[in-house]
Amino acid sequence: MSNKEKSPEFYKYYPKLFHDYYPKIEKSTVNILSEAGYSYYQSILKLDSIIDNMEVHKIFNVLNLQEETIKILSSVYPENHIFWKYWNMRKIEYFEAIFLEKNLWENPNSDNYYEVADKKSAFGKVAIDCLYVLSENKDEEVYKLLLESHKYFSIGFQLYDDVMDFSDDFYKKQFNYAVHELSKSVDFSKYNNDVILLHKLLYIEGVGIGVLNKSISYLTKAQETIKGLSEKKVWFNTINDFKQTIIGYRDVTDGYIKTIQERAKIKKIPIKDNFFDFEKIKNDEFIKGLQFIKSDFLKNYAELKHIMYLGSKEEFENDIDIHSSDTFQRALLNDCLLDITKSFDINAKDFFENENQYLLERKNEDEIGAWSYFPTVQEIAADIDDLGQIIQQFIRTDNKHLISIHCLKAINIVINERIQPSGGIETWIIPKDNLTKKQMKQDLFNSTKWGRGADVEVVANFIYALTLFDAEKYKLTISKAINYIISEQKDHGYWEARWYYGKFYGTYVCLRLLNEFPSEYKSSKQKIKNFLINSQNEDGSFDEEQYKNLSTSFAIFCIKLLKAPELAEAKRKAQKYLLDNQLIDGCWNSENFIKPKSHEPYKSKTLSTAYVLKALL
């Protein structure tokens, strides 16, 4: 039971939460009480820190804050005012809580825990006391209901806090309800008391969700206790807002656990071993890397797949909440494998024919066809990024005829209805008019969740596919799109991607397109060259720590495309960096790559490994 470094905003004005129940008290008085309350709250945080961490040097800060609080309160309540009787009562409660908390490990039943949670919030109750004693009618029933509601709120808050503070409290050996509950079902010694593993088990075993549900139930009790006092009050709404925060966290957490369970299920699905034979390769790094990719292939590409929780809370309406797909990832991976097999003269025709068939089986069965990032999510429309990547695979595997059969309708909708005046092309493939009910919903989600308009790296990927497919037929579209792409290039020479992390994926796909026109766009290519020269790190890598392997790989792709002698040393250093970072199992670390939602990046060891191997060719 510790205190979080960042406390909820409402502690700055705690008495205001209860002002609605005592409306005749002057607002200016409540402001003064709020100032006093926040000053004392800060002193309690520091006192807790002293007790928990033996930070004795902070005691003078505590005394100063408490002295300041008494001065402020004395301006409202004279020396002999009854308020001070309540104040002393709450002080006693708080110190009782400290004593009881130290003994919780010896007697950790729920009643003792709830008593500590209630008494530890004693100075929160002062916010109710201070208004009650100033009120004219002294309605004791309202006062008691508010205190009871506050008790349930404090218990709910502490339960949630213990889930969030699991690791910190475990390290400090402080009592934590979530730690205690997990200890009932898990022998910590079997995991060498490794707090990182235990924290994962908290959720995998369902204990964390159970504690969060208990927290939500107490917050509901806190609301129900004061329902008769009117629900349109600040205190009621504060409880509700906090409850919704916990429900959101619970649902996201529950979704995360379900994605882990889904990945475990996928691994168990039997799959035929038709991965290509790479025995002729003698290079150790490539053998180990391809062995890692093959091992994931034989587990149904469980590591490669993107698995997300998209539930009803976010207004998704599908038969399932956990969605798994590797359509786009597989096409990206195969692009790397095509280069690798070609470089080592490996016959992988049967493998890629099977991969083409796999993609065809995942094509949308609707008026447009094409491919969605998550085919099982009806709110996600087909997009030109998937379409462009799959077209490239069909072309590179000598199956151009598949484009005419399966892609032309989607291409025509994009060109006729989704090109912007700038030459940019909208990401989502939806007709402008006569939308079906499903398309209307997709259009709504594009507006409210995914975003509309053109995304430069997506445009570049799609236009590159059209250039490979039929540059003459789509000449005007290609020319306008390239003008748009060049207009989006940053002064430093890179492109900023909407859907991908780092500066180098977007830069690579844009340069790859421009490179189809060797004698044109020289100024833009020079900017890229300067960017590469100026952005390599001392260790040979490119970009930031969290996506160095990927960014370094994309930078090497750019260097290869530019064929500039002055970049040869940069390439050598970059490849050495990648070689030095291969892991013992043959892979390279997963790094943030695709960003479908805030704070929920897609990353994959399998895909990172494929990109690095391609960069090492």
Image (cartoon, helix red, strand yellow):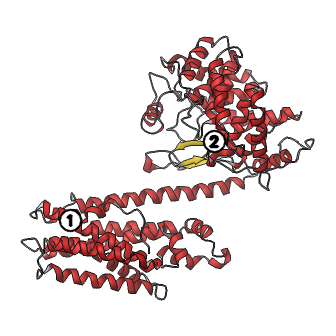
User: Quick check: 193 above or below 102?
Assistant: above
Residue 414 is drawn in which quadrant?
top right
Q: Residues within 10 Å of mark 2 (few under 14, many from 20)?
A: some
Residue 433: x and y, percent?
44, 21
Residue 167 is drawn in which quadrant?
bottom right
Residue 72 is drawn in which quadrant?
bottom left
Residue 453: x and y, percent?
48, 28
Instruction: Specify whether residue 572 is in view.
Output: yes
Q: Mark 2 or mark 1, which has the lower sequence index? A: 1
Closer to the camera: disc 2 or disc 1?
A: 2
**Taking 347 as reference, is 90 left or right?**
left
The residue lying at 65 percent from left, 36 percent from top is: 362
Q: Amino acid at mark 2?
A: Asp
Give the total of numbered labels: 2
Circle 2 — which element? loop
Residue annotated with mark 1: 18
Q: Amino acid at mark 1?
A: Phe
The residue lying at 74 percent from left, 22 percent from top is: 400
Residue 568: x and y, percent?
78, 32
- Nearer to us in this view, 489 or 276: 489
Numbered tag placed on residue 40 in the rendering: none
Residue annotated with mark 2: 543
The residue lying at 65 percent from left, 11 percent from top is: 473
**Viewport quadrant of the C terminus:** top right
